[in-house]
Image (tube, helix red, strand yellow):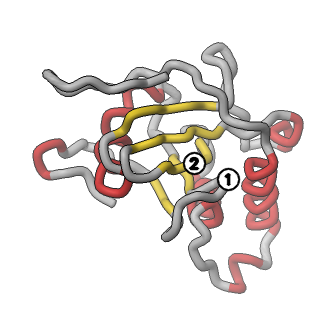
Amino acid sequence: MTVSASRRTASPVRLTLCGQLGRRVDGAWWPHSNRLAGELPELVGVLHGRLGDVVDISVNWSLSENLPDLNSRHWQNKHQHLMSITGRDATANLLIIPSLTPGTLAGLLLRIAAGLPLSAAHQDTPLFRTAAEIVDAARGDGALRPVPAPVQKERGRRSSTS
């Protein structure tokens, strides 16, 4: 997916989605920083074509909670952060990959969360098993609860974020 030509960012949105939405985890988003609110407008812009106008964003964590550190095994003791983005046409449930996650692990998480194919060589590695465990943990986490998330509103249009 790409950002429209009228709103092109210096850093592309790192996002994957399943072909068919409606799963507990439909894909993953790997933001460039821990300031998720600053990157939400670009994410919403990219998702617009697939979801329609975004009307709600829900997350399964409080605003005071840090993203889990996937660089160590401590992630096993914390629930994975998920974001549900609801548009007028569809909803996408995304695993949020912390920005400081190493690129190789993040790449595997992006592919596994969206159900994209991986070679047998990739699947026969400890890193793949770690990524698969993280996605499995995300699929088993508790229900998403609405937490107000800032969404850039277009002038003259109303949108709901709760």
Residue 156 falls left or right of residue 124? left
Q: Which mark is residue 93?
A: 2
Q: Which mark is residue 75?
A: none
- Depicted 120 relative to depicted 49: above or below: below
Q: Classify mark 1: residues with Cα within 10 Å, few (<14), some (14-19) or many (20+).
A: some
The residue under the point 51% across, 47% down is: 29
- Mark 2 secondary-structure assignment: strand
Q: Which residue is mark 1?
A: 24
Q: Earlier in the sequence, mark 1 or mark 2?
A: 1
Which residue is at the far bottom?
A: 120
On the image, the x and y values in percent for residue 23 come to 64, 58
The residue under the point 25% across, 43% down is: 10
Separation of residues labelled 1 and 2 (CA atoms)? 6 Å
- Depicted 2 relative to depicted 57: above or below: below
Which residue is at the far right?
A: 77
- Viewer-side residue, 108 vs 56: 56
- Mark 1 secondary-structure assignment: loop
On the image, the x and y values in percent for residue 112 come to 64, 65
Give the residue type that dot 1 points to: Arg
Report if the CB atoms under discs 1 and 2 are less than 8 Å apart: yes
On the image, the x and y values in percent for residue 106 come to 60, 54
On the image, the x and y values in percent for residue 134 come to 76, 52
Residue 66 falls left or right of residue 47? right
Q: Quadrant of the N terminus?
A: bottom left
- Depicted 78 relative to depicted 118: above or below: above
The residue under the point 75% across, 52% down is: 139
